[in-house]
Structures are given as structure tokens and as C-alpha cells.
Image (cartoon, rainbow, N blue to C red):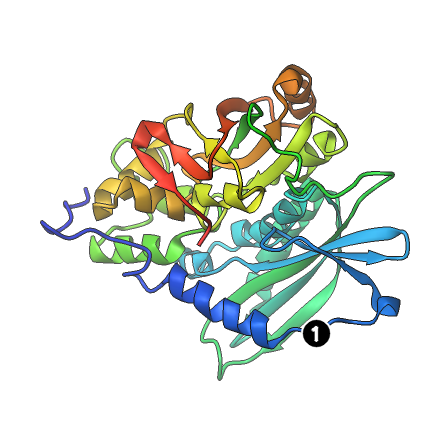
Amino acid sequence: MASAPPRGRTSSYAASGVDLPKRAVALGELLRTAKYAAPPSHGRLVPAPGHYAGLLRIGRETVALTTDTVGTKVLLAERLGRWEEVGEDMVAINVNDLAAVGARPAGIVDTVLCATPDPDVFRALGRGLGRGLRAARCSLLGGETAIVGDIVRGIDLGATAMGFFPGRREPVLGARIRPGDRILGIPSTGLHANGFTLVRRLLEENAIDPTRARPGGRNPIGTELLRPTRTYSAMADAVADRPEVHGLAHISGGGVRNLTRLHRHVRFDLDDWPSPPSLFGWLKALGGISDREMFETFNMGIGFVVVVASSGIAPIRRRLARAGAADSRLIGRVEPGRGVEVPGFGLRYSGYA
């Protein structure tokens, strides 16, 4: 059983080595110095600042591109010798970002950086990748495997995904969100692939054996933590054409603050947020983590959000159910104001960073 955290000390993402405000400043400098406007013959950038995917208009078509890595979840996978889950994550974390702009995934290219290519590890990664591709209904187009032992000691996993907008679908960027809209949440399968730098620190500091079950848990802790990211692309695809759908959001790194990426001039009032699964409560107690830190680091049980006109709730929920999200539920509403509030936990966030 885990011991209580030392009195007077609480854990945080920043203390574990991930300083999000500092990252925001550094990223701002990168974007500022990398500005370049390509000629129209090379495609026209569709403005979507701060959104989940980059959008490019090529002729009459719009394509969406996004890229992400599995992050330090791979270190837990390496410790346990389990690679299929993070293989599946490589697909899910990226197609979910495409889903958040209403794009249908078309293909993935993967990136594997490693010190030594291990056939057994790659075989297991391939099985997970295959499951992720089937769930997202998209193809593996290629990728890059680099043996760079001077840079990485273990393995680093990422991917880039491309999506498109079928028929006459337009990107769903949140511009039509207005007070009175309702917020539907679709549950996560666990931590997905966020916050693992903090999680691994908690396991280490408390001498937690990930092969054993936590108090109240049925499976080994490592199994719970490695559970792959839920794929939401088919669910989003089922509703993205509907005029009642005003916004889509992937609740990933940054937690509920992600909602401010959809519209900065309304308030997302999450007044019916469900009780987070016990795994989150266990982590919170393990590190003495504040509710504020939990909700801005983890998904807290809701992995995807659909913002819907109040008159369209029932038909949208039916569509979501047919696409695999029979567990969608109302979690809040849109109100005048700005930011995100979670009244049940006394939380208010003004922005994403």
C-alpha cells in the first residue's frame, strides 16, 4: 500500500520536470522566428490558431495535419516489457486531434527513434499500431525508423496524421459556439498518454510496484496506466456534418483548459462533470495533488467533448451511440463570459496555457 506524501509537500507537473508556462514561452519564440508565407501555388493556410490540427487548402480540398508523440508513457511500457498499448497510442493520440477539427483520418506516418532496433519490441508495436489503424479506419503510409543511440537510450514513439473533409464538410473550429449550447462528454479509458512524467515520479517516490494492484483495483497498476488511448475519430465523424454540432475537443495534455481553444469569448461551465474514475483519485492521494493540478494535467475521465445546440442533444447522442459512444453524457453548458469552470471542484481557468 502506498504511503502518504510527506507532510506539507504536494506533487505537480512542473516539479516533475514539465513546466507548461515555460513551454508556451519557448514555443512562442519558435513560431515567431519561423514565420513564412508560402506562395498560393503551394496551398493556402486556413487560419486556426491554437487549434488541434493545421489546415491547408489545396485547390478545392482542405487537408488537416497533426503530429504528437506518446511521451514518457514509453518508459513505463519499457519497464513492464509491454509495447502493444503504446503502439495503439501512436495512432489514437493523433487521429483524436484530427477528430477535434472534424477531419476524417486518411493516413499515418510513424516515427520511431531508438538506440537498438529490437525485433520483438517492433513486432509488439506493430500489433498495437494495427489495432489503432483499424479503430481509426486509416492506413499506415510509411514513416521513419532512426537508430540514434547518441540521442535516445531507449525508444521514442510518435506519428503524424493527415485527415480530410469529405463531401461538403467544413472544418469544425468552434466559431458557432454560443451561450445556451450544451456540452456532451465521452469518457476516456484512463490516463491515455498524458501526465506520465508526473505519474512515473509518483510511482518512484512512493516505491510503487506497477505489477501489483492498487488498493481497490482489480488489475496491476501498470495495466491500468498503460491502457491505450480511446479512439474518437469514428464518433466525431458521425456528427461533424450536423449543423447542431458547434465544436469538438480532445481532452488531452492541458486537461479541461483545452476547451478554450474552441472559443475564447464564452465560458464553458462544466457543472455536471462526473466523478472521476478511482485511478485518478488514487494518483491524487498518492502525491497530494491539488484538484487544480489534476484537472489541468489529466483528462479526469472525459476524453472527448462535443458542443451541441440545445435543440440537438437527443439526435446527436443517438448518432454518437451508433458510432460507439453509447456512454456519452451531458457534462455542462456554454455561458456568457470567458474560460472554463468546474463548479463541483471550485475551479476556474482563464486560458489554455
Q: Residue at x 44, y 38 (%)?
A: 340
Give the x, y percent position of residue 253.
47, 51
Quick check: 165 above or below 11?
above
Give the x, y percent position of residue 227.
48, 43
Give the x, y percent position of residue 140.
74, 56
Residue sticking out furthest to the left: 7
Q: Residue at x 48, y 60 (%)?
A: 71
Q: Disc 1 residue type?
A: Tyr
Residue that badge 1 annotates: 36
- The image quadrant where one finds the N terminus is top left
Structural crowding at the residue carrying mark 1, measured as other residues with C-alpha within 10 Å and reported as few (<14), some (14–19) or many (≥20): few
User: Is 144 situated left or right of 151 in this image?
Assistant: right
Examine the image and state in which quarter residue 19 appears.
Answer: bottom left
Quick check: 150 above or below 116?
below
Give SS at disc 1: loop
Q: Visible in this render: residue 236?
A: yes
> Residue 53 versus residue 217: which sits nearer the camera?
53
User: Is 301 situated left or right of 176 in this image?
Assistant: left
Give the x, y percent position of residue 164.
79, 48
- The image quadrant where one finds the C terminus is bottom left
Quick check: 309 above or below 93?
above
